[in-house]
Amino acid sequence: MLVQHAVSEGAGLIATALERAGIEQTVFRTDLGEPLPNERAIRTLGGLVVLGGAMSVHDVHDHPWLVAERDLLASATSEGLTVLGVCLGAQQLAMALGAEVTTGSLPEIGPGQVMLTAEGLEDPVLGPAGPAFPCMHWHADTFAIPEGGVRLSGNAMFANQAFRYGERAYGLQFHVELDAAQAETWSTELPAGVTIPDEAQARIEEIGTGIIERLVALADR
């Protein structure tokens, strides 16, 4: 199951990896007013992916579905399902697990890099990407690591860029789903002066594909 919050923030490489693995995809579009399934229905799902969006986790007045989404994430994690939260989805996962989400001193937007922690290097999903790897950022908020979670990566701007909770729940502040089509769409929406060069996009896609495929493989175990 995938939850999408904006037309321009689709699943990209995640959808491609799931299709290659023969995994059926059900997409819920909160931006179209589609209701999320009740957390009791989570046992019927094979896994949960929550994508990014321009809203904040705190914008519950304008987006009341944020609360239901956090309940869904908490239930999926407690059931031991494979869970991936990307950007807003990572912040939602962190909050669902009791961690604080705050706004950083400056936004981080555009191609960048993250460095793995010692635990990140040992992680089966992120570790093979190497001690430092390129990624795409588009966020101003950041999350604390939930109690019991494992900090996997960070950089100079934001200390917490990825975490794992249990064996199968991952929150990634950066975008691993960025494929060429999504990069082209985003290029018209990025702030002035921010670009995604083709070479950078290709490398980000290469790294993202590996991360996603390893997570999908983990879900099959």
Image (spheres, grey):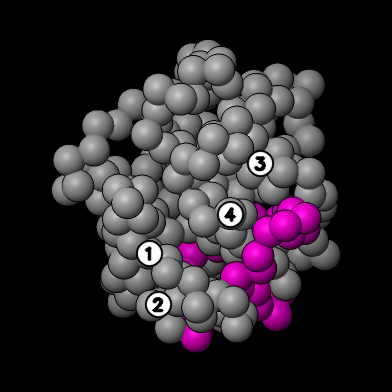
Hey, which quadrant is residue 19 in on the image?
top left
Answer above or below: position of 59 versus 87. Answer: above
Looking at the image, do the residues carrying marks 1 and 4 touch, with CB atoms under 8 Å apart? no
Q: Which of marks 4 and 2 is nearer the N terminus?
A: 2
> Which residue is labeled 2 in the image?
129
Name the front one of labels 4 and 2. 4
**103 part of magenta stretch:** no
Name the front one of labels 3 and 4. 4
From the viewer's perspective, tell me whether residue 20 is left or right of residue 35. Answer: left
Crowd tier of the residue under label 3, counting other residues whose Cα lies within 10 Å: few below 14, some 14–19, many 20 or above: many
Image coords of residue 148 (percent x, y): 72, 57
Name the front one of labels 1 and 4. 4
Q: Distance between the residues labelled 2 and 3?
A: 24 Å
- Please give the range of residues in magenta: 131-157
Identity of the amino acid at label 1? Ile
Crowd tier of the residue under label 2, counting other residues whose Cα lies within 10 Å: few below 14, some 14–19, many 20 or above: some
Q: Which of marks 3 and 1 is nearer the N terminus?
A: 3
Q: Which of 188 and 158 is in front in this view?
A: 158
Res. 1 visible in picture: yes
From the viewer's perspective, tell me whether residue 41 is left or right of residue 151. Answer: left
Res. 178 visible in picture: no
Image coords of residue 188 (percent x, y): 44, 50
> Which residue is labeled 1 in the image?
211
What residue is at 78 percent from the left and 44 percent from the top?
Answer: 98
What residue is at 37 percent from the left and 43 percent from the top?
Answer: 11
Looking at the image, do the residues carrying marks 2 and 3 touch, with CB atoms under 8 Å apart? no
